[in-house]
Amino acid sequence: MIRATFLVVGVLVAGCGREVANERDAIAPVAEGEVRSEPLQELFARHVLSSFVKQLRLADVVRDESWQFDKASGTLRFGDSIEYRVQVLGTESHGSDTWLWAWANEASKIPPGHLVAANRLRTFGHEQGIDELTTAMVSLDILDGHTAGMIASGVAVGNAYFRCPYEGGAMFVLITDPLTDSPVEADVIRTTRAIAEAFSNFEISNQRQVMLAYLRQRGIEVQVEGQTVQAVSEGKPWFTAEFDESNRLTSIKATTALLLALFDAVSPDWRASGGNRSHGAAQTQTDEPGECDRDVSPRGSALSAARGFAWTDDWRGIPSPDGRFMIIPLSSAETKVDLAGGKGAALAKLIRSQVPVPSGFLVGIDVYATYLAENGIAPRLPAMLAGIAPDDLSELEAASRRIRSEFSSSRLSDEAVRAIGIGYCELRELIACDEPPLVAVRSSATCEDGPELSFAGQYETYLNVQGEAELLEAVVKCWSSLWTSRAISYRLRNGVSHDGLSIAVVVQQMVQADVSGVLFTANPLTGRRSEMVIDATRGNGDDYVSGQSNPERYIIDR
């Protein structure tokens, strides 16, 4: 049996007790090689999805708080303010690889009032002929604490279960108090995550039937077409699941509509934090007792259903009302110059050519155009640029200051804030970052380098940006860099019209480089295509691009 499911990490607590049963009550573990009975398997499949959702909700509530269990009162406390009443289910022994039901563990002297759930499971086992629920001690290959906890959360009418580790084993308790409510969209996210996790980690036959039964039990509308199942709310699909001919899950994807709806339900404090994720929840048990891999649970209202749900090959981005795209993954086929600017389109082409490029997304040029229109900037630009000569430095600087101050004093729409926030949180999930990731925020104008012109270094890039607030500020600064005095002068000198200019923004995972530079595929001084030129400098290269340092130059024959 695979034992990979939810753990919540905390500090050790005294009083859990060693699992020692009287000889007359202890029954020898099932012989090696035997498997759990079919009735237990069916019972587990019936409750596994609802239990996974409860575990995710508990993880969202307790986050990385330390815990303490009071055996006398039967209370489980997290941090300074969260307290739940619990029932004791049983204990795992890592020495004997056995599960011992709490009703058989006289040595731990658990008060009878805390054994109601375990006894209810025992009675249920007698009624249904499920030996694993009535046998005092069972091999962990047949029944472990996680399996018992999932079944108990359904049969014993509890909420989530919790694992209290101690040296040599762990005690499992069932929380009976209600958990904190959360937005409907967050529960749909958890449901989607639970389906993916459960079907990946456990051998469950006819997964399609199990999922349909659970969704209908929850009152979630479903639309079924062949082996495709859609969960629907108010006529809009929340997620889509695909099954093969054996009714096994092959893919499950959250829709953009769900991500946008969920972002609306997220608290402003959470958004301002950059989407800090909990660190001690929903982890996967490894082969070594007490060791867990990295956190794989989203925070209480996390924007990504499961890692990779939105960032699949066919996810095209977040659309604007006119059907174009506000947020576009760098790898998307939609990443072209008219939406992504020159730099964004070039990076996308490199990705499609299998060149390693740091992960990221684009804030499309439509977001810039909407920003200008909503804040009334566009109609004022011609007057602020009128009559300026390309070599009049003071006038160029004054015009640039006026225009850029318009940007800094204007407001991003809620729709744009929401879309950029989702892109940032999706990037965080994609690169599996425990903290809000450091990113490079890069300008990508529609008027980039061409055969006769070079705009290199004229538009701004911001490095080591962290958190949503910093990201939003950097995006606006990149937009306004289209109107630096240098860029205005260059366009005037080269006859490039200011009309119709637009700019996208590239947001990429930050790379802390030891050495960086530029590779020219033809010698820029001689025009020879038989030579490549590399200009390199130490660090991230921002000083080089801005002209503040002299690079080392290498000329390489092709």
Image (cartoon, helix red, strand yellow):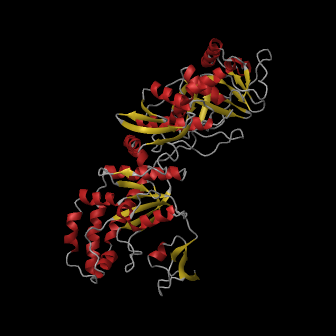
Specify the farthest residue to the top: 127
Instruction: Report whether residue 183 is seen.
Output: no
Residue at 52%, 41% in the rendered image: 251
Q: Is residue 132 left or right of residue 334?
A: right
Q: Is residue 397 left or right of residue 186?
A: left
Residue at 52%, 51% in the rendered image: 430
**Numbered marks: total:** 0
Specify the farthest residue to the bottom: 526
Q: Considering depth in this image, is 200 or 457 the residue closer to the camera?
A: 200
Which of the 4 quarters of the picture holds residue 395?
Answer: bottom left
Q: Where is residue 103 shown, x and y percent of the image?
A: 68, 17
Q: Considering depth in this image, is 386 or 445 the residue closer to the camera?
A: 445
Which of the 4 quarters of the picture holds residue 65?
Answer: top right
> Considering the image in quadrants, where does the C terminus appear?
bottom right
> Considering the image in quadrants, where does the N terminus appear?
top right
Q: Considering depth in this image, is 31 or 263 the residue closer to the camera?
A: 31
Q: Is residue 318 above or below residue 27?
A: below
Q: Where is residue 293 shown, x and y percent of the image?
A: 63, 45
Q: Is residue 355 above or below residue 419?
A: below
Q: Where is residue 210 shown, x and y percent of the image?
A: 54, 28
Q: Where is residue 299 shown, x and y percent of the image?
A: 49, 42
Instruction: Report whether residue 142 is seen.
Output: yes
